[in-house]
Image (cartoon, grey):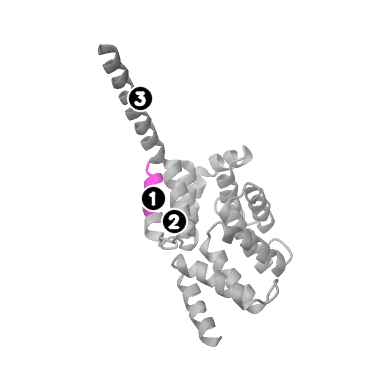
Amino acid sequence: MLNKMSLNQMRFSLAVLALTILGCAASSPEAQLEESIQWYTGELGSVDDSQARRLLELSATDGNAMSVMWLARVYSTGRMTFEADKAKAVSLATSVIDDIEAMANQGNGEAMLLMGTAYAEGLAKEVDPEMAVQWYRDAAALNNTLALHNLGNVYASGTGVPQDDELAAQWWLKAAHKGDAIPQLRLGGVYEQGRGVEKDIDEAVRWYSDSASRGNQAAAAALKRLLAES
């Protein structure tokens, strides 16, 4: 009986330990940042900038380099409900850029995305659209959602690459399939207009609907207009 009780107590202790470890992992800065980004893009089913901001700020509390660089990213242009503050963005980026670059060179996809942002927006690096694209490509090869998204953007605008609507749509499609609401909105537009793809109103409705379901108001307005016209 004692041996059986001891065994049960041991199993219970191991279960508690496992749950504790899992809880710590779930609350790590890396996990908080990952969840923040997914709320920001809509990959968790809806866009929630307030939740994304809360988790990002929490993840940066102890100076996690990736989180600090993400703070630089959101302050740079005023993303995720943050007011744009370029000076603050540059200061934050400067404090961690060496760490981010080292992680990117070691193959970290999120760091690669952030290096792309650094070169695209002048965050502790001189603006260099071609270098930004190079880093976005490296991150996209690792299936980083925002790198896929941003490659669509650069091809749409012709920033650092020759302008190409077809390639823009292809990259946005990859990000949209992962649940990123903005590329879903963009795809609604390109299918509605037949820009880089064959015009297809049903596909436009589909992508506007997907984006709207994640809370994108521009997509909801476009969907309402398109349905009213049909």
Residue at (63%, 39%) from the top-left corner? 105
Horizontal placement of 230 versus 163: left or right?
A: left
Q: Residue furthest bottom?
A: 229
Circle 2 sits in a helix, a strand or a loop, which is it?
helix
Amino acid type, mark 1 = Leu
Dot in front, 1 or 2: 2
Circle 1 sits in a helix, a strand or a loop, which is it?
helix
Q: Which residue is mark 2?
A: 39
Query: Residue 178, how many percent across, how many down?
Result: 56, 56
Q: Are marks 3 and 1 in contact (CB under 8 Å)?
A: no
Q: What's drawn in magenta, residue-wise?
A: 53-63
Q: Earlier in the sequence, mark 1 or mark 2?
A: 2
Q: Quadrant of residue 172?
A: bottom right
Dot in front, 3 or 1: 3
Query: Residue 163, how many percent across, how many down?
Result: 72, 68
Horizontal placement of 7 versus 190: left or right?
A: left
Q: Quadrant of the C terminus?
A: bottom right
Q: Is residue 164 visible?
A: no
The relative height of residue 211 versus residue 92 in the rendered view (above or below) is: below
Residue at (60%, 42%) from the top-left corner? 104
Residue 162: say if magenta.
no
